[in-house]
Image (spheres, rainbow, N blue to C red):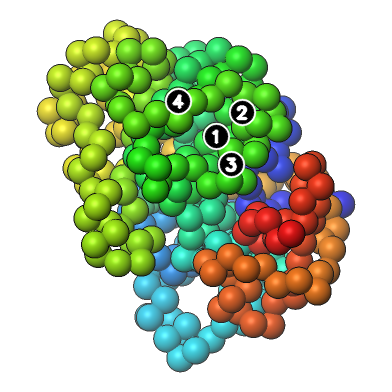
Amino acid sequence: MKNKNVIDLEALTPEQLERICSLAEEIKRAPEKYRHSCDGKILATLFYEPSTRTQMSFQTAMLRLGGRTIGFDDPMNSSVAKGENLKDTITIVSGYADIIAMRHPSEGSATAATLCSSVPIINGGDGGHLHPTQTLTDVITLNAEKGRLHDLTIGLCGDLLNGRTVHSLIKTMANYKNNKFVLISTKALSIPGYVRSILERKHCEYKEVSSLKEAIAELDVLYMTRIQQERFASEQEYMDQKGIFVLDCEKLALAKKDMVILHPLPRVDEIDVKVDNDPRACYFKQAVYGMYGRMALIYLLLNDRDFAFDCYKPQLSDSKCKNPKCIVQSESYLPYNCKYDSDGHLVCNYCDHIIE
Ligand code: CP
């Protein structure tokens, strides 16, 4: 079975990922060649959560390809405010648009949307779960700035529990040979178990540490992240984690001269603004690479019939996912849907949490 939904970058073959990266570079070099490649097509951006980069870069990408956009950036300005469920919104919008990019606070919401959409769904972030087009952005940036995707020591620092960009990036970079991961966080914000299982299953070298200052010297890449205030149960729990990891010029002085600093943005206080002037700071360039990556992705999804991904037939289950942040908790009509991972665990097909 094949489909054109971009839920998790894992579904793409290395060749497909490479094709998007090289097309993004080609579009960056010669944008005029692609100016009319999506004439007459419509992208819907359905953003149930705030966004600057993802939403606007998707919209800009479509406009630069000659297409048009519709959508909402606040569900309270749509019929969601009157109680419309995800199924009905997606069913309706997929009759209006040729492709949908969506962001939603519940984990697994993008997969849930695919069940009722007649057009490709692109996951622009589903709660703390995944953010595949950010990973595409990160991969394109690394390819351009480091010249390779393998043999890298990659430090990821900050909120590794709730940072969906971290989960997506680890899953993708674990596929390239000799990448090592240095996971820099407090215990409370360390990576979720399913991401750790992936690192172990793929036999990746990784360590979990609590000091950015001690770890920075060995890194080829430092991926800083914001503490995700909106994912905490209380203000106090957020305040306990805030401000622990800050990249400043003093720490940067200990880093390799060719280390690349990435950040999915938005930044709060985890990178001192003085670091912005350092040539190693690539996070603003990264956001621009993201627009070209999204142009390449939209172009291929809409123009190349064969650009599709393997997917498996979901297995229905009697067991409900217990992850309180999973989409099945709020959209009660959804079938319980599971799969077996390669360790034999039954996992939720929406949010990837282990059911049993
Ligand atoms: N990187 C990213 O997802 O940024 P936005 O939240 O502004 O879209």
- The amino acid marked with disc number 2 is Ala
Q: Residue 22: horizontal and vertical position, in percent?
A: 58, 25
Disc 3 to disc 4, C-alpha distance: 14 Å
For the residues labelled 1 and 2, say whether their Cβ atoms are less than 8 Å apart.
yes
Q: Residues within 10 Å of mark 2 (few under 14, many from 20)?
A: many
Give the x, y percent position of residue 190.
44, 42
Three-letter residue code for mark 1: Ile
SS at badge 2: loop
> Which one is earlier in the sequence, the residue at label 2 or at label 4?
2
* Separation of residues labelled 1 and 2 (CA atoms): 6 Å
Which-is-in-front pick, marks 2 and 3? 3
Question: Closer to the observer: label 1 or label 3?
Answer: 3
Q: Which residue is mark 1?
A: 170
Q: Position of residue 264 (x, y in %)?
A: 38, 40
Cα distance in 3D space between marks 4 and 1: 11 Å
Q: Point out the tag, 1 or 3, that comes first from the N-terminus.
A: 1
* In-front residue for pair 290/115: 115
